[in-house]
Image (spheres, helix red, strand yellow):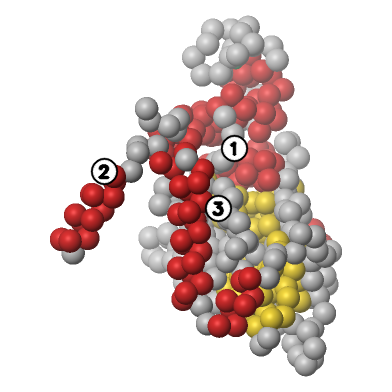
Amino acid sequence: MKRKRIDRKKRSLARPRDWESLADTAFSRDLSRHRRALAKLPEASVQRALLALPESFTPNGIVISHTKKWAFVQLYTPPEGAEGHREHLCLVDERLPEGEESLLAPGDEVYVEREGDELVVRGIAPRRSRLARLAGPHERVRVQVLAANADLLAIVASTTHPPFRPGLIDRFLIAAMAGGVAPVLVVNKLDLAPMPPEAKLIYEPIGVPVIGTSCVTGEGIQELASHLRGRTCVLAGHSGVGKSSLLSALDPNLRVITQEVTPDGRGRHTTTLARLYVLREDIRVIDTPGIRALGLWNITPDEVMFYFPEIAEHAVSCRFRNCTHTHEPSCAVKAAVSEGKIPELRYASYRRILASLASEEQITPGRARPRES
Ligand SMILES: Nc1nc2c(ncn2[C@@H]2O[C@H](COP(=O)(O)OP(=O)(O)OP(=O)(O)O)[C@@H](O)[C@H]2O)c(=O)[nH]1
Ligand SMILES: [Mg+2]
Ligand SMILES: [Zn+2]
């Protein structure tokens, strides 16, 4: 243990400070990592690793769920000798390059090749859309993709247990717009409490359909199904709001695990891995684990207002062109809020998001920090 530490110290002393910027040093480091990986693999895999990755391909399957090394893939046509059975565990080719986004997400279209007894993911098609969030500071990638190629994001909230909180909804709306996914708001557990008035008041005027549901009485489930037909939809929201229950309500043949919400109403994080389900009536749903916070990516503070259509609409009349609508005089947005033309809750969300973007930049400075000199 002690010895290791000394070694590491020596190494860091021996290297020039900016060794990572020297391309050939970085390359040789990568190569040795690659060699180490090869040494650990069985013979068949070594053979495979020496074949080139295809430069162009037609996807032949869709990712259902995955870990770092493995992916469950639904193949469009069953491979030879595997009749009818279409979901297959595939090895993920470790040479597929991971950029700033997660390499794989449920919904990704992939190209799978048979190599001996194994099926291997050899290519990933460019994403048409993504639902993504800023990854935690300890994750390998900067942007965690929760779901790929979805047409719709159903932001699920509940009337109560857990309580209705617009803050996360507003963030999901931004993530949906930024990722090219159309949002709908689903307010579940109508059997426990009526629809919170602000749900319709705030979101319908900005063009977000609001659907009230109950998995207990079945209310609204048909309406939800009609939105989803022929599409791929992500279910996302706080833990315990009933995402997995909605999935079971949409297709009772599915056995999706759900759990009681704890007495404090905080939910229990029953779903731990995002997964795509193919339901009847040509509906594909990606169920995701409940989250507490959604860090926004690729958005600068001055862009935030463009994700709040009702704020952007009034902003043109502000005295200052670069008005942030927080402290400036003659701000048309603040005036519209006090006249009730912009809901106070949305304006509060706008300010919270603006403030958090500034602090997120401070919390995760390692990500985009200019190189120390
Ligand atoms: N009363 C009532 N309870 C519901 C409804 N929908 C879900 N529940 C209950 O809420 C609890 C949580 O439901 P889940 O479907 O596991 O919630 P989830 O959003 O998938 O939670 P995570 O997987 O942790 O993100 C379970 O006890 C469900 O039975 C509903 O419409 N009405
Ligand atoms: Mg769940
Ligand atoms: Zn303003």
Give the label on residue 362, or none.
none
Tell me the SS state at disc 1: loop
Disc 2 or 3, which lies upstream in sequence?
2
Position of 248 with respect to 300 (left or right) is: right
Residue 298 — which label? 1
Name the mark nearer the viewer: 2 or 1: 2
Tag on residue 144? 3
Tag 2–tag 3 contact (CB < 8 Å): no
Neighbour tally class for label 1: few under 14, some 14-19, many 20 plus, Cα within 10 Å: few
- Please name the residue shown 76% across and 76% down the image: 75
The C terminus lies in quadrant: top left
Q: Residue at x 63, y 40 (%)?
A: 174
Residue type, label 2: Leu
| Residue 10 image point, x, y percent | 23, 49
Relative to 81, say whether 77 is above or below: above
- Closer-to-camera residue (190/82): 82
Q: Do the residues labelled 3 and 1 touch (CB within 8 Å)?
A: no
Q: Using the image, tell me which numbered label, if any, was put on residue 13.
A: 2
Label whose residue precedes the other's in the sequence (3 or 1): 3
Of labels 2 and 3, the one closer to you: 2
Q: Where is residue 234 in the image (x, y as percent from the top left)?
A: 67, 59
Element type at mark 2: helix
**Residue 17 x/y as whole percent:** 35, 37
Mark 2 / mark 1, whichever is N-terminal: 2
Which quarter of the rendered picture does the N terminus lie within?
bottom left
Say what amino acid the circle numbered 1 marks. Asn
Determine whether the residue tagged by mark 3 lies in a helix, strand or loop: strand
